[in-house]
Image (cartoon, rainbow, N blue to C red):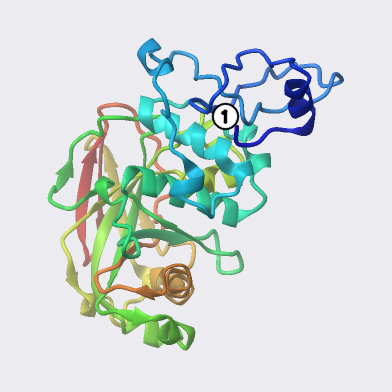
Amino acid sequence: MRFMHNHLKAALDAGQAPHGWHGGRKFAIIAAMSENQDCKGGWCGPAPFANTPPIGLAPELQTQDEVLPDWKTLWPDLPEDSYATADALWWSRRLGTPQARGADVAALMRDGADARAVQSALARTWNWWPADRAPRYWKSGGPDRQAALLHVPLPEGGIRQEDSLVPAPETVFNLRGAEAEIALRIGRDVSAAETAALDYDSALALVDAVCVAVEWVDVRWRDGTKAPALALLADGQCHGGLALGEWQSASVIAGRDWAQQRCTVTVNGGSPQRFTGTHSLGDPAWLLVDWLQHVAREYGSVPAGTVVTTGTWCGCMPLQAGDRFEMAFDGLGGLGWQF
């Protein structure tokens, strides 16, 4: 048993097993709580160790031993209080549908470090990138230059770069949101010592290529984007997948006036929507210093070929099944995704 709140442990010690308890460690999933639940009798939040399989779990899975990953062995840096968050997201990905509300697990994480530890544990479980190097693909950004930036590694299996029109995703949890972005690629290995001394110009000089990108926005929590911030961060900050356009030399953005950069978006070939100078940071390269320092701090260095997509120019476009999202940046190229 991995952890439990004190009153639940006392009940078990007294021989009063909670409802749904089956012993062992095969299952740990957040039990969704009723909005009208009476909390006067004690704990009224999620059952964090609940050892109860999610509703609808196939019976054959309910009888298997060691279904869930052994987080302590797999990712020792994951705090025990965050095991339930990792369990919930693991089940969602395993079953292809949301299995818990983010609101039920957010309080089990203390801060962003706990949420990132959940990401890392899941990455090791699903082999999102090789264990012997830093992730190759990242998303980065923030609402403005005064806010703290978020830097999130992306599952490499969800990167598409061979299609001018990306086919519909096989599994959609909640959303088919699409964002038009610009991605930057680092041309050589960068040490942690080098990143510590970077400024805007020296960071931009490390970029060897640029391309347009479409990020697919999706969430694995039942409460979708309404889940608390830590739950969204633990889930990869609403990432579903990333499509990259054709790489071009970084010289195409040298001296570019980003305030005049235009992005044009269409849905199903309809009327074009135009966005000019609408990047939240004013310049997609503005985040490079902070992002490079974060990667080096977490992984020791930034390998050549590491890619960061830099945030939306069009907001998050809500789409329905079958919609075709197409975008183009003047002077940089275009890309489409059939959702």
Q: Residue at image x 39%, y 20%?
A: 64
Left or right side of 149 for 322: left
Q: Nearer the viewer, residue 46 or 140?
A: 46
**What amino acid is found at the position of numbered circle 1 in the picture?**
Arg
Image quarter where the C terminus lies is top left
Residue 216, visible in the rendered structure? yes
Residue 24 placement: quadrant: top right
**Left or right of 99, for residue 178:** left
Q: Does residue 174 appear in this view?
A: no
Residue at the image point whose x is 34% and y is 30% from the top? 172
Total marks placed = 1
Residue indicated by mark 1:
101
Quadrant location, the N terminus: top right
Residue 160 or residue 312, whichever sits in front: 160
Picture quadrant of residue 201? bottom left
Left or right: 325 with respect to 101?
Answer: left
Along the viewing direction, whichever of 218 and 265 lies nearer the viewer: 218
Residue 85 position in % (x across, y down): 55, 38
Name the residue located 55 percent from the left edge and 29 percent from the top edge.
223
Q: Position of residue 105 (x, y in %)?
A: 62, 36
Residue at image coords 49%, 43% = 71
Q: Is residue 82 above or below residue 104?
A: below
Q: Position of residue 39 (x, y in %)?
A: 82, 21
The relative height of residue 240 versus residue 214 in the rendered view (above or below) is above
The relative height of residue 1 versus residue 280 in the rendered view (above or below) is: above
Residue 288 appears at what percent x and percent y?
A: 42, 74
Q: Is residue 104 left or right of residue 244?
A: right
Splitting the image into 4 quarters, where does residue 328 fall?
bottom left
Count residues near mark 1 (Cα–Cα under 10 Å), then give few for <14, some for 14-19, many for 20+. many
Kindly state the secondary structure of the residue where label 1 is placed. Answer: loop
